Each structure stands twice: as C-alpha cells, then as structure tokens.
Image: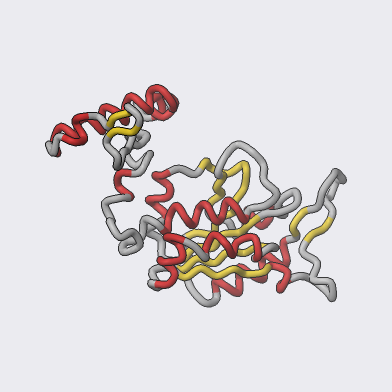
Amino acid sequence: MHIDIITLHPGLLESPFQHSIVKRAIEKKLVEVNFINLRDYGIGNYKQVDDSPFGGGAGMVMTIEPIAKCIEELKAKRTYDEVIYLSPDGELFNQQMANHFSMAKNIILLCGHYKGVDERVRELFITKEISIGDYVLSGGELPAAIFCDAIIRLLPGVLSDETSALSDSFQDNLLAPPVYTRPADYKGLKVPDVLLSGDPKQIENWRHEQSIERTQKRRPDILKKHE
C-alpha cells in the first residue's frame, strides 16, 4: 500500500508513524507513507497557499492552485484508488470503511486547514470525504493519522496474530467483550470461571453474549443501525 498525505504541517504527522504497529508496518515495507508539504507548491515568493473568501467572512481558505498542482503531479506517477479529503462534513469513518480502504493500493489524503479548501478542489479532485467525528479540529493531520492507523493495522502481515484484528470492536457491529489476564484473582475481583474452563465453545458463546450486552448498554445506536 502507498499513502500520500498532503499537509501544511508535516511535523504534526511524524510521531504517529514512528512508533508501534504503524512503524513496524513501514519497516516491513508493507506500507509506504509520504508526507507532502503543500507549501512547496505555494504561489509566489511567499509560497502562498491561502486567501480570504469571496463574499467576506472570517478566516482564510486554502486556494485551489497549489492543491491542484500537487495532486496532478502525484497522479502523473501512479493511479490512485481514492483521493480523500479529511473534513468535518464528510462521511463518518467507521470500521467497515477501514476494512474497505485497507484493500486499496494507492491513496491520497488531503488535510484541510483554516476554513477549509476552495469548493472546486472537492468538485475536481476529491473522490471521498471522511470525518472522524462531529467536532472541529485545527486541521486534518490528526484525522489523517487516525485513518492511516485504522487501515494499516489491517494489512496482512502487520499484526503478529492476524486474527487479532478480526476480534476488534465494531468488526461484527458489536463492541468487544471484556478481557482479562493474570492474576485470576485481584483483591477479590475474579476472572469469570468460563474463561478458565478451557472450553472454546463456552468461551466463544460467553464473549458473544458479553459483546451484545456491552453494546446494548453503551452503544445501543449501533444495534439500531444494523437491525
């Protein structure tokens, strides 16, 4: 997989890709992630990438020319499955979307800033708009890092136990069940007997029941959505 992230602040993205599972995936060459500084494509001596909005109003808008030049240059090198704009008014990102995008070969992520991008960027270049939640952040860098983490961990060979991702929350539209490890008894709080029984069928049934119960209690909206 190849991911190009277009950003005004590459430094904001460096740390999430230098640790843990994502770092190992990059080192194994299972994914290549490039941070592209949009200011390199800015206009004039000052590398301008933003301007005031037509019609007035507060804030600045990312201009179309630098973004268009950057995306067109990237597209000249390879064919992309998706050009994604991280936006608060995009489709809400979920596990099913992560599963889908983990099968892509090449992806461009565009990180917004200021009051967003010129609408013509969306009309001409963007194939998908994604939001990570109903709130506004300073820019698209953190959503881009979250998006990448969610899909990279699903790539074959990334996790040491590839069945681990299949038992994550939301994979079957349920929250994950409670998990326990040693000690079996901590200050009177004991691990459920079924988990110590050694009976795979009973354990599987218990976990499924716990997932349903936890989802009903904490996220009933998920169950209603998939009824």
Q: Is residue 19 left or right of residue 216?
A: right
The picture places residue 173, in percent across and down from the top left corner, at 35, 35
Question: Image point 42% across, 72% down: which residue?
Answer: 27
The residue located at (56%, 49%) in the rendering is 129
Q: Residue at x 47, y 70 (%)?
A: 32
Q: Residue furthest front?
A: 187
In this view, 211 is above or below 101: above
Q: Nearer the viewer, residue 3 or 123?
A: 3
Q: Quadrant where the N terminus lies?
A: bottom left
Looking at the image, which residue sits at the far right? Answer: 56
Relative side of 226 to 57, left or right: left
Front residue (pair 147, 188): 188
Q: Position of residue 183 (x, y in %)?
A: 29, 39
Q: Residue at x 80, y 67 (%)?
A: 48
> Quarter of the image containing the C terminus?
top left
The image shows residue 188, relative to residue 204, as above or below, that is above
Q: Report whether residue 30 is seen.
A: yes
Query: What's the coloring here?
Result: secondary structure
Q: Is residue 150 left or right of residue 44?
A: left
Q: How many numbered tags mark residues here?
A: 0
Which percent across, then down, holds residue 59?
82, 48
- Residue 85, by quadrant, is bottom right
Please tell me in which quadrant of the rendered image residue 105 appears: bottom left
* Residue 19 left/right relative to 55: left
Whether residue 123 is visible here, answered yes or no, is: no
Q: Nearer the viewer, residue 97 or 144?
A: 144
Residue 67 rendering spot, x and y as whole percentages:
67, 65
